[in-house]
Every structure is written in structure tokens, then in C-alpha cells.
Amino acid sequence: MTTVDVRLLIAGHSSQRERLARRGGAWRSVPFPATVAVIAHPSGTVLYDTGYSQRYVDATRPMPERLYRWIIPGVISSGESAVEQLAARGIAASDISTIVLSHLHADHSSGILDFPVARIVAAEAPEGTAGQRARGSLWSTTSRGVLPATLPEDYAQRRVDPATLPAVETGLLGMGEGYDVMGDGSIVAVPLPGHSPGHFGLWLPTTQGPRVLLVGDACWLRAALTGDLPPQQVIATMHDPDAYVRTITALTRLAAARPDILIVPSHCQETVDAASALLDG
Ligand SMILES: [Zn+2]
């Protein structure tokens, strides 16, 4: 089995009231990092999500997209976007061969225009792109957390639906089959439904360190896997609340049965810090 090298970057962050992320949380705002995984594979570098970029800031100036930033205030500093951090590590945008998007929410996808040649592995096909910011549907895309202005015009040509890739057994308790992104079983897209349409995680069974399961927004905080779920009203806002709870339940069982697997939610600062220490060490 091919061993991949995985590192985590934080490309901007938003702030959320802790109370929205876990039932017993405080009303104070806590940072929600936008995590990007950089996976070095022998046939190219793969990203899982792209985080925030300056394009998010530009795209959320006009109405109705501005509402998105009011509700989820994303912040990205100069030098903090994925493409800039990769350049600082000697990785050019054109070196990125594949980007797996957990889903199309802007905190995961708004950096994608910075990577012009990457194949895009994503379940969701957007209703608009940077070139066709169709007025009519903007209210509906914005309300679903998607910013067409941040998506490449050739998205449809570069997109590969994960379900069209070869199916492989993940061997992960309760997870069933996934989709083989690189053709050698080293990077496997795993359906983690509920949060948004076609939400996918990424399973990395052989890395330079522990086995890694990137779970995107299947849960916001690692604490959810010990029962500290978001309040019911927040779960009700998910694309498919029942599937969201089923996914968290499956991840909770997996976490208990397989402590050897590093489960990394996109927005859990504590987990991202601990995982980075393990992976970079
Ligand atoms: Zn998110």
C-alpha cells in the first residue's frame, strides 16, 4: 500500500458561539479554523478542502452574499490562504493534481479558483460559477452556504463525482464502502451524509504517522464523538438532520473501537493542533 504524507494547514477561520457547536457550550465566540489537508502522493499532491481565500472576502461584499459573512464571519489574513502557504513550502498551485471537496460551503471551497488544473472530486455540482453569477438563484445558493463567484468556470469539466470512482471496502466500522481517489487505495473518499448534500470525508489508511480519517463537517468538534452534540435547533438546520445524527453515531462507535485512527473534524482547533503535532513530529 502506498504511504502518503499528510499535513494540515489552517486557511482562515470563522467565529461561532460555542453554544451552537455543543449543547453545554458558552455563549462566547470561539474560533473555527478552516482546515486544509495537504496529502503528498507519488503521483501528485492532493488537497482535502481549500479553506478560505481572499475570493471569499470579495464574493461576500455584494448582496445577497454579504448575508453569508454576517452569519458566518470568515477571516483570512494575508499569506494565510492555502495557495500562499503551499507556495511558502515550495508547492506550486499547478502541483496540486486533485482536490477532494468535503462539500461546497464557502469555508471549504472558496480557495478552489487558486488551483487551475486540479481535478475536483466533489459530489456537488454548483448552480453557478465565477463567470455566471446568475442573479435568480443567488438567494438560494447563499442560503445554502455556497458562493458561485468563488467557483471556477470549468468546474463541471474538472469535476469527478466520487461515486464514479472504483468502490473499495474501507474496513472502517459502520462506514462500508468508499471511493478510491488515486486508484491504489491510499486515499479513499468516504460518504458522511447529513451536514450538506453529498458530504464526503477522506480515509488515509497509511500515512507517515497514524491512520487518518478527515471528517469535514460531519462533526464540528471532536467532543461530539463523546456525546457532546450541537443543540437540537442547530442539528435541525442541517441538510438531512437524521443522516447527520446517524453519521455522528457511526463515527462515535468507530472512535471508541479504533483509538488508533486520528479522526479530524475541519473546525476543531484542539484536534487540529493535536493532529498537527503527531503528523509533523
Ligand atoms: Zn465548514
Image: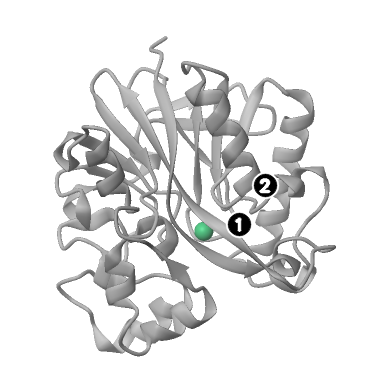
Q: Residue at x 42, y 9 (%)?
A: 1
Q: Secondary structure at mark 2?
A: helix
Its colouring scheme is: one colour
- Above-or-below relation of 258 to 142: above
Q: Residue at x 72, y 40 (%)?
A: 250
Q: Secondary structure at mark 1?
A: loop
Instruction: Examine the image and state in which quarter residue 124 appears.
Output: bottom left
Q: Residue type at mark 2?
A: Thr
Q: Nearer the viewer, residue 43 or 170?
A: 43
Q: Residue type at mark 1?
A: Gly
Q: Which residue is the site of mark 1?
A: 194
Task: Answer yes or no: is residue 128 visible.
Answer: no
Q: x, y (%) of residue 11?
A: 40, 52
Badge 2 vs badge 1, beta-carbon distance below 8 Å: yes
Task: Answer yes or no: is residue 238 visible.
Answer: yes
Q: Is residue 11 left or right of residue 236?
A: left
* 3D distance between C-alphas at marks 2 and 1: 7 Å
Q: Is residue 84 left or right of residue 29?
A: left
Q: Under 8 Å from ligand 1: the CB of mark 1?
A: no
Q: Residue at x 39, y 19 (%)?
A: 4
Residue 247: which numbered mark, if any?
2
Instruction: Examine the image and state in which quarter residue 104 appears.
Output: bottom left
Q: Residue at x 27, y 30 (%)?
A: 45
First along the sequence among labels 2 and 1: 1
Q: Under 8 Å from ligand 1: the CB of mark 2?
A: no
Q: x, y (%) of residue 223?
A: 76, 47
- Above-or-below relation of 264 to 50: above
Q: Nearer the viewer, residue 67 or 123?
A: 67
Q: Residues within 10 Å of mark 2 (few under 14, many from 20)?
A: many
- Above-or-below relation of 178 to 41: below
